Structure formats: structure tokens, C-alpha cells
Amino acid sequence: MENYKIEKPAFKLGIPAKVAIIVVIAVILRILLLVLLPLRQTTELPPLSMLSAQFGMIPIMLIMITFLTITITLVLVKIQNNLKVSRTEMIFRSVFSFTLICFLAVLETVPSLGKPIEGEILIAFSDIIPIIFIGILSAFLNKNYTKSNFRISALFKNIHKAFIITAVYFVGRYLLYAIINVQSGYSLRPGPTFIWTLLLGFSIGLLYIMLEPGIKSDSIFKKALIFGLLIFGVYWTLNNLFMPVVFDMSSINFNPPFMNYVFRFLLDILFVITGVWLSERRT
């Protein structure tokens, strides 16, 4: 009588399971950093928003941090599934893509509100350390990698696309400053505002060229929409809403103050979509 060996199916985590595992650990790490880093000694917190006053600052902040973490994790896990690269390159693309933009996003308060840079850098580090963790862990949970050699020079072969996106975003942002008068250091701190705007635009361009190989679409316009709305847009919307949801930002010189943030993320998304579309049209 022949012996038959029953092979057990290989256990494979689906995207929801990967996202859940990563998000839980990343949020815990973020909370630990907020506790361990001396943020309150270096930054002056604004008054609480109505939501924070009603339900507590910690629960509202935790909800916003969780949504931001879910957004970034979903993007990286999905993109990594489409990348046909080595695990090392996968980690580099994932970590490098969001860390710079998140770091600079926090530092906007320096030129726009005149906050001391030391405290904002600490907050920025508490933001990007969990993102580094997300990029590394999501890559190790991903089995769709190749044995190809990793060459850093290959990552920047489309650097011209980043420059085009930077230029479009930079011009668009200055229209926001000059015409719509969103809160910025456009008048009081023109030098730092110029540098910050240029660097943020370039970080968005780098985000695109890092993740673009994982965007599966033959349509230039659809690719621009996927990146501008889903990859950049959802994160940027949550990032801009963080402060007015958690804190009372009525001191912002804009009427009504909440629209200061709405104009930012809506028009920034439009500038990015336009920049990606133009960068692809030029290639």
C-alpha cells in the first residue's frame, strides 16, 4: 500500500493581516516615543479643540495617529506587492519615500508659526521612527521580492520627474501664500519659507519616483490620480487635519481658521496631480 504525504499549505499573511500587525506595533512605538522624548519641555502646546476638550486630547490624538499609520502602512504594503525588486531595495524605497516628507511636514511650523526648531525636530523624529519601522517590517512580511542586485543609482534614474513635480508644487504653493493668504511665513520669514517649500516639493517628487514602479497603470492621468489622491492625498489630508482636530487653531489668521488647512490639502493635491502628469508627459 502506497504511503501518501499530505503537504500542508504554506501559511501566507494577506494584506489586512499584515496591515493590522504593523499598525498595532507602529502605534505603540509612536506612543512610547511621545512619552520618552521631552516634547512638552521643548514645545508649547496650543489650547485644545472642542473634540479634545470633550473626549480628551490623548484619545483624539491616538485616533489621528492610528489613521495616519494605517494610511502609510496600506500604501507601502500595496506598493511592495507590486515591486519586483530585492528586499533591500524594497526597504530603501519604502523607508526613504515617506520619512523625508513626514519630517518636513512637521517642520512647517518653524517658518509659518515661528516655532523653535529644536522642539519641532523632536516631534519630527517621533513621526519618522515608526515609519522606518513600517517600511522595514512590511518588506520582511512581503514574499514577492527578487534576488536582483540593489544599485542606489537606479533609484534616481527618473530624478527629472522629481524636479518637475517640485517646480509645479513650488509655484502652486506660492500662489497659496500670495493670493489665498494661507498661514505661512511668506511675509515675516521669507527665507525659511522659500527653503521649506522647495524642500517639501522635492520630497514629494522623491516620494513619487520611489513608489512609481509599484503603481500599476498604463494611463498617465490615472497614474497621476492614484499618486496624487491615494498615495499622497490621503496622507496629506490627515496630516493637515491633525492640528485643527486635536488643538484649537482659532489664532490662525484666516477666516474661518479651519479653511486654512482645507485649502492647503485640496490645492496641494491638485498641484501634485498636475506635477506628476506633466512629469510623465515629458518622458
Image (spheres, rainbow, N blue to C red):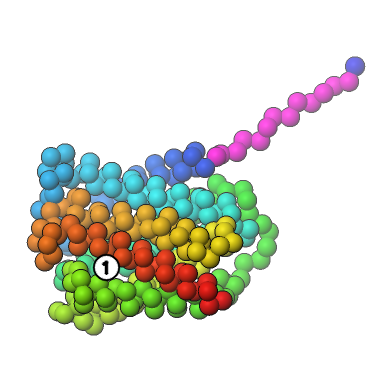
> Can see residue 20?
yes
> Can see residue 90?
no
Dot 1: element: helix
Badge count: 1
Where is the N terminus found, in terms of image quarters?
top right
Residue furthest bottom as drawn? 191
Q: Position of residue 75 (x, y in %)?
A: 46, 53
Asked if 249 appears above or below 113 in the picture, the reply is above
Where is the C terminus found, in terms of image quarters?
bottom right
Q: Give the residue number, with chain letter if any, for mark 1.
A: 107
Q: Position of residue 53 (x, y in %)?
A: 11, 43
Please name whichever residue, 181 or 59, is drawn nearer the observer in this view of the structure.
181
Please name whichever residue, 215 or 175, is drawn nearer the observer in this view of the structure.
175
Per the image, is 170 magenta? no
Which image quarter: residue 84? bottom right
The part of the chain drawn in magenta is 2-14
Is 203 situated left or right of 111 in this image? right
The residue at the point 24 percent across, 59 percent down is 262
The residue at the point 36 percent across, 63 percent down is 269
Which image quarter: residue 51? top left
Asked if 132 appears above or below 155 in the picture, the reply is above
The residue at the point 26 percent across, 76 percent down is 175
Q: Position of residue 191 (x, y in %)?
A: 23, 83
Asked if 26 appears above or below 162 in the picture, the reply is above
Tell me the amino acid under the disc marked 1.
Answer: Leu
- What secondary structure is the magenta-colored segment mainly? loop
Please name whichever residue, 129 or 195, is drawn nearer the observer in this view of the structure.
195
Q: Position of residue 152 (x, y in %)?
A: 57, 72
